[in-house]
Amino acid sequence: MMDRLPHEKGFHVSWDQLHRDARALAWRLDGTPWRAVVAVTRGGLVPAMIVARELDIRTIDTISIRSYKGVGNEAGQGQLEVLKQPDAELMGDGEGILVVDDLVDSGRTLELIHQMYPKAHLATVYAKPKGKPMVKSYVTEVSQDTWIFFPWDMALQYVQPFRGDD
């Protein structure tokens, strides 16, 4: 068994894959008369735009919550900090509001959003086991120790094979 850093068990998501998965999320959410989509910034911006387009939802807002700090081995979740809230009149208690994020990991961010807007529907494209209870809809589950590399985090470059040298 090889010793690896947590981010070395990676799931690389291309722009095409993210688009397909966000459309699949929209299909699961179709049929409900949503009043608005709220994107959790920053990771939820792209999936929320795709979901809103697919479901023909024109009212879109954002909620900005900072939880991750640092980069690489120094990254980790810190104290949650709400940087920007969506329009209070639009949100109310969340009834008819679809909140979209790219990923639920520990569930802390979505737990805070649920406390703020208890009737909102929380949806993510990807879900890890610890955070899955906080989300009502998702497309793909990945293991807790998998690091998801989103297309906005990557550049085109050579990558060493998982096993072997060539």
Image: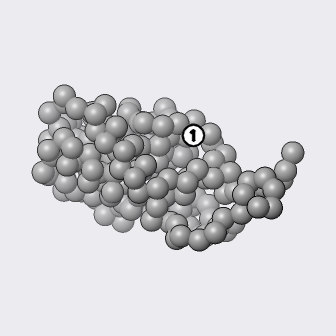
Q: Residues within 10 Å of mark 1 (few under 14, many from 20)?
A: some
Residue pushed farthest front?
A: 166
Q: Quadrant of the C terminus?
A: bottom right
Q: Is residue 62 above or below residue 33?
A: below
Task: Return the x and y of residue 99 as percentages of the image width and height.
Answer: 30, 45
Q: Residue at x 22, y 32 (%)?
A: 30
Residue 13 visible in rendering: yes
Residue 36 visible in rendering: no
Q: Residue at x 80, y 61 (%)?
A: 165
Q: Is residue 52 above or below residue 141?
A: below
Q: Nearer the viewer, residue 126 or 23?
A: 23
Q: Looking at the image, how many numbered discs can be counted on the residues?
A: 1
Task: Return the x and y of residue 154 as percentages of the image width and height.
Answer: 52, 67
Q: Residue at x 63, y 47 (%)?
A: 146
Res. 118 image quadrant: top left
Q: Nearer the viewer, residue 100 or 118?
A: 100
Q: Amino acid at mark 1?
A: Val
Q: Which residue is mark 1?
A: 142
Task: Return the x and y of residue 22 as percentages of the image width and height.
Answer: 35, 45
> The residue tagged with tag 1: helix, strand or loop?
loop
Res. 86 image quadrant: bottom left
In this image, 32 relative to 124: left or right? Answer: left
The colour scheme is one colour
Q: Quadrant of the N terminus?
A: top right
Res. 24 image quadrant: top left
In this image, 30 relative to 150: left or right? Answer: left
Task: Return the x and y of residue 82 as percentages of the image width and height.
Answer: 38, 61
Residue pushed farthest right?
A: 1
Q: Residue at x 36, y 60 (%)?
A: 41
